[in-house]
Image: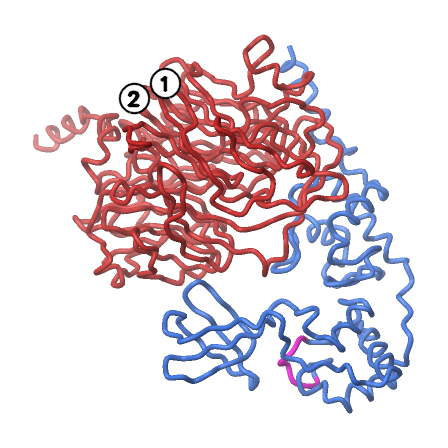
Amino acid sequence: MWRRILLAALPAFCQSPHDAIPDVALGRRLFDSQCALCHGPGGAGGRGPSLNRPKLAKAADDAALTKVIREGLAPEMPGSWQLSVREVASVAAYVKSLGSVPVEKVPGDARRGESVYKSSGCAGCHIISGQGNGLGPELTLAGARRNAAHLRESVVNPAAYLPDGYLMVEAVTAEGLTVSGTRAAEDPFTIQIADPSGRFHSFRKSGLRALRKLEKRSGMPAFDKLPAGSLDDLVAYLASLRGN
Amino acid sequence: MRFATFALAAAVLPAQVPYERILNAAKEPGSWLTYSGSYSGQRYSPLAGITAANVSRLRVRWTKQFALARTQVSPIVADGVMYITAPNQAEALDLKTGRTLWSWSRPIPSDYQSIGFGRVSRGPAILDDKLYVATLDCYLVALDIRTGQERWTSRVEDYKPGYSMTLAPLAIRGKVLVGVSGGEAGIRGFVDAYDAASGKRLWRFYTIPGKGEPGNETWSGESWKTGGSSTWVTGAYDPDLNLVYWGTGNPGPDWNGDGRLGDNLYACSFVALDAETGKLKWHFQFTPHDTHDWDATHVPILLNTTVRGQPRKLVVNPNRNAFYYALDRTSGEFLAGQAYVKQTWAKVLDDRGRPIVIPGTEPNEQGVLVWPSLNGATVWFSPSYSPLTNLVYVSAREVGATYFKREAEYKPGTFFAGGGEVRIPVDQQWGAVRALEAATGKMVWEFRLTSPPWAGTMATAGGLVFSGTQEGNIFALDARTGKPLWDFQAGGPVFANPVSFNIDGQQHVALAADRVLYVFGL
């Protein structure tokens, strides 16, 4: 009997448009519990990009946004296969509602901050709009990808938030040569290291005398001696980098 | 005249792969005749041509490309032909070259949906003159092994409420057994047996007892009707006891157990079924009232060894819930068990193998951090066992997750899970191939992996263990020590199980990495 009812009910349930009617309140609850860990409360950004913008770079329209929520963005953002169609639609609706949230106000002057950036030698390791050296993460969209608090911490204590792909490693070859740099790739048998000049080195682990992962170390020096005003200005400059 | 004689002879050819050949698989190690290589579920190759001394010379002999990524196929090899599957597809390949001899496909209905799992097919089964394929839209299809033409097609269940099949069928004497996916769609799981010749269903064992049956009282209210307990990985078979062993999946909704109070039998269990009738002989539940999606849909490993001085017939299992179990396979009696991966949800197993659950580890609204993650300490991919070392080799995952509980409302054909998880950061996840004592689960060695694995293991009489990584390595370890002896960069993550067979009398190994099946030989 149950099966008969179940089967009879199927055509009505399976393709029901109700399944996809979004509920912004539900979307917010889901976002707070599963997305805010990276995107920050209210989508203000954190380890993941801020979402309080009218247009999202990797989710330009509703279909793209739904796809990103459902499938994730490799390698950092996981998909959400466990969410129902309606739940995904609800998260998408909530994320879209964030677009009307005003951009975070930060102390400091972005124009002065650009001078601090140049005089501090940041361009020696970072690229902004094609200018600089790319040893560290590109900063062209730093303000869109990270909130101001995260940017500030990254300047004064770079080891606090090591971005993916920037683990520092140190390999000692059988001949006693030490190669340090960022880990470009690793598997159980081999490791590939980018040294400070940008040159890649590939090693079989079994052939190394030592291999150390410098888990808490960043390749970037800590800029913790900047005068408070200069730090505010630098953070304001970085926060202004939103691809405009 | 000569042609006529030939044609006549072909017309009366005996069945190519009779049951006795599969039963005695160890006597023809050059073939791979059933999902796990033999009915015991050991994924052990008796071939010893590739050894620690020569494995470093392995090289690719041929490859087969697939249209879809992340193929999980475990091929069948018989009489110079390799049989493979992809979702709703099958092919016969020339074993020497990989060239396609025939192919078959069945359209996937446009309204079909995989609810809670990927579109995959883990392989075919072979028996007599037929190849058996389980389809996503829940049909069991018998193909002529010489041509790929359909001999019969049987509907196992309606795919629309969420039933599906991703597993390789299990062919035993005169019967083909299958199980179903759909544990996140509120299905009621079962194991089915079909007549191998006609496709007629012979029996069905529901993995959730119906009203009035023993065990139904372990589900509150009407929750048993939508309780999941899927059966999506191939079982094992003991011909002497005539028992089929099958693992069952999570109860549903996965992360919200409020509406299904009780142990939820026979979810997260091994069931031992009479092969003739499908009647339950015994069951053992690994995770009573599971709320973390820790399916026990593993290949049961049947092995004989000594336990506390006594020879015993065992069924063993490194479980998704992070504990290893050794059971007596004649009775289901718990003999030994211990954690083989980090876990934070149970104090210990009691003397009957029941976990003493740590309070506060069930998912809640705020989220609770628990090891292992929902994908568990290991998942569907096969462990293996070598009678030479008496060790079980398992691909182990070291991942924790914050579990959340949410409301769950059952609607046929929709996701019915009641929560989810957020895993710990990727750089804190890792994995290993671990060798465990068969009788106890005690770790003897481990080979560390950079990322949590999705590949099965295969042990060989050459003293090796083969497996793969998420970084694309296909590799061989020394079965006694875990020392790495050979590796190959396949260019894509491995989500499959290795198999081994002979080509022209020489041992080969096959394993798929992403979209490519690699065949290696010396």
Check disc 2 and report its element: helix, strand or loop: loop
What residue occupies the far left of the structure in this picture? B1
Which percent across, then down, holds residue B50? Answer: 23, 54
| Location of the N terminus of chain B (image quadrant) | top left
Which percent across, then down, holds residue B409? Answer: 73, 28
Numbered range of the magenta stretch: A131-137
Amino acid found under the numbered disc labelled 2: Arg
Q: Is residue A19 above or below residue B476?
A: above
Which chain is represented by red in the image? B
Q: CA distance from mark 1 to mark 2?
A: 9 Å
Is residue B138 visible in the rendered image? The answer is no
Amino acid found under the numbered disc labelled 1: Ala
Which percent across, then down, holds residue B288? Answer: 58, 28
Which percent across, then down, holds residue B399? Answer: 57, 50
Q: Nearer the viewer, residue A225 or B502?
A: A225
Q: Residues within 10 Å of mark 1 (few under 14, many from 20)?
A: many
For label 1, the residue is B275
Check disc 1 and report its element: helix, strand or loop: loop
Q: Chain of mark 2?
A: B
Which chain is represented by blue in the image? A
B50 inside magenta stretch: no
Q: Earlier in the sequence, mark 1 or mark 2?
A: 2
Q: Is residue B284 above or below residue B511?
A: above
For label 2, the residue is B173
Q: Residue at x 60, y 49 (%)?
A: B400
Disc 1 and disc 2 in contact, CB within 8 angstroms: yes
Q: Is B210 situated left or right of B89 in this image?
A: right
